[in-house]
Structure formats: C-alpha cells, structure tokens
Amino acid sequence: MSTAIEFDRVSKVFGSGTSRVEALREVSLSVQAGQIHAVVGCSGAGKSTLLRTVNGLERPTSGRVVVAGRDTTALSGKELYAARQQTGMIFQQFNLLSARTVYGNIAYPLRLAGLSKDAVLDRVEELLAFVGLTDKALSYPSQLSGGQKQRVGIARALATEPQIILSDEATSALDPATTAEVAGLLQRTNEEYGVTVLLVTHEIDVVRDIAHRVTVMDAGGVVEDGTTYDVFSRPQHAVTRRFVSSVLRSVPDEGALATIRRVHRGRLVQLHVEDRETDQPFLSEVARRTGVDFDVVYGGVEELQDRLFGSLTLELLGEPAAVEAAVAQLRVSTTVVDLDAAAPPAPSRALRLAEEVAVGA
Amino acid sequence: MREFDLETFLPRFWQALGDTAVMTAVSFVVAGVLGVLLALWLYASRPGNILENRVVFAVLNFVINLVRPVPFLIVAIAVVGLTRLVFGTGLGPLPQTLPLSIVASVAIARVVESNLVAVAPGAVEAGTAMGASPARVLFTVVVPEALGPVVLGLTYILVALLDATAVAGALGGGGLGYLALNYGWARFDYTVIVIVVVTLVVLVQAVQAGGNLVARRVMH
C-alpha cells in the first residue's frame, strides 16, 4: 500500500507573545492510499489545522506535508492552485455558493479545470446521479436540506476526480440519520473510486462506521494511531478511552452496576471479549470444572471491520473458593476485571477503562 | 395665494422631471462605475486579500471617510470651481452631476465594499480549496455571492441621489427640487409643493420596487 499523504514533523504556531498558540506540535503521520483515515480529538486539538495543511489552506510553521510525492508546503501560485484542484474538500457548513444552482456548484471546479461545456455537463450529470440529486440540479442551496447540501458538497469535491478527499467535520452539522447517510456516501466514494479520505471529526460513531484507521490528537500532538479495530478494542490513551467509551456501551457504568446489584448479589466480573481463534467454549468449561454457576448480567459484543469485540459482565455463584478458582481460570483465556475485589489486582488496561467510565469521564 | 395655473405649470413640471432624471441617471451611472471599481480596489487591498497594501487601503479608506460625512450642499459648493472648469458653467443639470457623482461614488464604494466583506468566509474558502486563484475567487465567488445585497445597497443610494438632486437643483441644477423651492416655497404655492412631494414619493417607491425585484432575482 502506498502513502497518499505524509506529515513530517508538522508544527503550526498561531500568534505570538501571550496570544501564541501551538496548534500543531511536530505531527508525523502517514495516510495510506485508498483508506479512510480518521483524525479524532476534542475541539482545539489541532485536527482541522492538520487537515488544512494538506491543500495549503494553512501553512505549517515548520515541517513538510508530502502529497503524491510533492511537498505541498513548498508550492505557491499556479502550482498550488493546480494541486488544490486535485484535492477535494468538504466542510462542516457545506460552503456551497449560494448564488449558484446545484449544477453550478458542481460545475465550478470543472470550469476551473478548463473543461469544455459539454464535458462539464456530462460530468455533472454523472456526479448528480452518484449522489442521488439528479432532480435537484436547478435548485439553489437554500432550497436543500442539510444532508442534500452535503451531498452536493461531496459531488463538488469529487468533480475533478481527485485522489484525495479532505473532510473537515463534514457530518458535524447534521442530525444522526443524515450523518449516517453522508458517512455512507463517503464510504461509497472510497470504495467505488478508491479515493483516499482524510476525515477530521469529533463524532466517534462516524469513525467506527467507516474509518479504516484512526489517529487520536490531543493538544496539537498525536496520542494514538492505529487501525480502527485496535484503537477501539484496546484504547491506550485517556482521550481515546473517553471517545471510545461514548460509543461502546458494553461496560456497565456506576448506575448500571447499582441496578445489577439490586438483584445479583454474587461475585461480579467483567470479561473482555475479542476475536478468538478457536470456538472452544471457555465459559462453560470453567463453570463445569469449578462447579460455579454463572449468569450474564450486562454486556455487548460488536462487530468492527469484520472482527468482534466487546465486554460481558458475569455474576458467579458458588463456594467462595470455587468462585476464586473460576476467576483465576477465566484470566487464562481473557482479560478479567474483578468488580467486587476490595483491592483490585494489578491494574489491567480493562480496569482503567472501567474506572474511566465509572467516573463518567 | 394665487390660483393654480396648470397650463403654465405643466411644461415647467415636465422640464423639472427631465432635469431630475438626467441628474440622477447620469450621476448614478458614473458613480456606479467609479464606486464599484473603488470598492473592488478597497476590498482587494485589505490585509490578507490579493492586492494587500496597507498604504493604499488606508488612503482609500481615509478619502472615503473624508467625503462621506460632508453634507452634499457643502460638497457641491466646495467643488463649484472644478464644476465651472469642466462644464464652463455651474448652472443646469449636467454640471451638477459632478458633485453628485463624487458623493455617490464614495457612498457606493462603501456600500459595495461592506457587502463584499460580508460574504461568507466559507464560500471564499471553498473557492480557494477548489484551486481558484485569488482574482478568480474575487470575481467568481465574492462578487456573485454579494450581488443581492449590493443591488439593495445601490437602490438605497439611488434613492439618496434623488434626494440630493433637490439640493443640486437649488444650486442651479434645475429639477423637481428647484421647482418646489422657486415655484412652490418662494411663491407660497403649496399645490406645487404637494405635486413635487407626491411625484418624489412615487419615484422613490418605483425605484425601491425595481431594486427589490432585481435583488430577488439575483438572491437565492
């Protein structure tokens, strides 16, 4: 797989003196061609600034941004305009031209590229069909819904057949149903045209649904980077855990635990569920071997990028010694968080996750 | 108070209406061209724009602010020397288009510039991101996006011009203002004043309605 965008120690400083803000601190990152690469982080983390260095809307204070083998930070004038024509961009507020029709908006980049009138017409018709807005060609942006506007935005970004689409919070101004629809369209764009999508968002649902890879940013730096599966199933950084826990609800929070305990007085343990290589039923085996009964009281398993992961909370019932043995045997097969232990064992990753959720972070 | 004599009044009225129309139309066209150019120059020389130039921006800004607060009457008197030099006389509707054009130009420059500046930054950013040069962004994004409010602004100025022609008329330009002052006010003929006022009201309404119509066509 080749690299589509390479950020090489990119820094960006805004202002000076007391108003000096370091928006980006030596960010190095590779975006692979043909992938949907999400950059997540809280507002002010620097993710939009990073995105905007790709097409030169923002000039890094230092560092290089290599797109298709060329350092975009070194481009200016006509070279820069030409490079921008080869990079599509979609925006949170859509940024359509209100004085032009849907047709005119999508035709705009094609006219910039110098296409003939007939070629523009053909291409716009094709794009309108792709985004499902053929009947809206002569409407003005003010006559469209938010989702329709963003579909026009996507069609416009795709017009010149770019290799890269930059998506700057493209779904953040949309309601959940429309967000899913627009995210789906981005995914279809990636799959059908093989376009690399660099997607900046604070909406973790969108990342889970369509991203192949995730970079987590905090305070201008990269704190975590990996495949979506890895980042979601084994989040390392506190910021990542906070994001991930907001969409994965398989781990009970304090309130849920209290509800569970009203009925379930046995020992509560929380198991980490991951893709496994065998279909060996370790739960029932452990139960049979130790003579302990168990009940599933909470949990969920999700599918992500064709792999499974999640968490199950079990109530173990039996002799204290047998229960202890069962917990020990479960630990052989997976990560276990003992929710009843007075002094928790060596803080596992999952425990830290549980704590994070419990304090409502 | 004398009897109102329609027969002597009507020719004067048509003459005055014509003079007002000439003064308004000529100065509006001249000021429209000058004012829009001035606005584009002002906008382009703003910090961060294509022809970014602090000195030019400051000077243009100062000149516009210098002329704008001065009442039209004072401007017309101040430039009367220039008017005589250019037209050979200060009397008649055409010479008066000079001060009218000066005042309207700076007003149009300011109104148009304000509307260019007010164009959504997102639209400008989209144009830039699509690879349009700054000049192309100005003429294919900023100007079209600002057109609706610009038309309304120009309509406002056209009405103000109509208003100013009354003063120009009093200074020797002729027109409806002159008619009202010399045949109405000076001769205590309120019928003339009423007719002039009604005519002006009708004209203003017509201009505003026309402006609204055009603005609706270009705004979406």
Image (spheres, coloured by chain):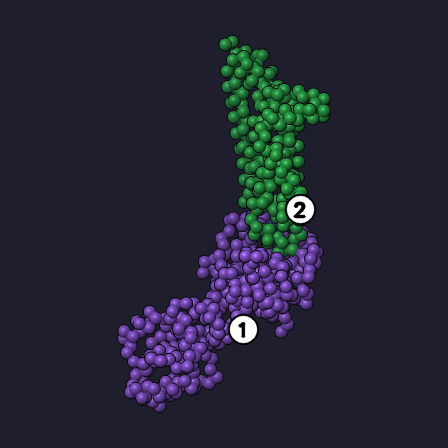
Chain colours: A purple, B green
**Residue B75: where, in percent of width, then height?**
62, 27
Q: Is residue A359 above or below residue A337?
A: above
Amino acid type for the residue under numbered disc 1: Gly
Q: Which residue is mark 2?
A: B53
Residue type (three-letter) at the residue carrying disc 2: Asn
Q: Residues within 10 Å of mark 2 (few under 14, many from 20)?
A: some
**Local secondary structure at mark 2:** loop
**Callouts 1 and 2 on one subunit:** no
Residue at x 63%, y 25% (from the top left corner): B76
Residue drawn 64% across the image and 72% down it: A2
Query: How many numbered markers are drawn?
Result: 2
Visible in this render: residue B54?
Answer: yes
Q: Quadrant of residue B144?
A: top right
Q: Is residue A336 left or right of B62 when viewed as pictured?
A: left
The picture places residue B26, in percent across and down from the top left corner, at 65, 29
On screen, residue A231 versus residue A114, left or right, reads left
Chain letter of disc 1 in the image: A
Q: State the separation of the CA atoms marked 1 and 2.
A: 47 Å
Residue A284 can be seen in this image: no
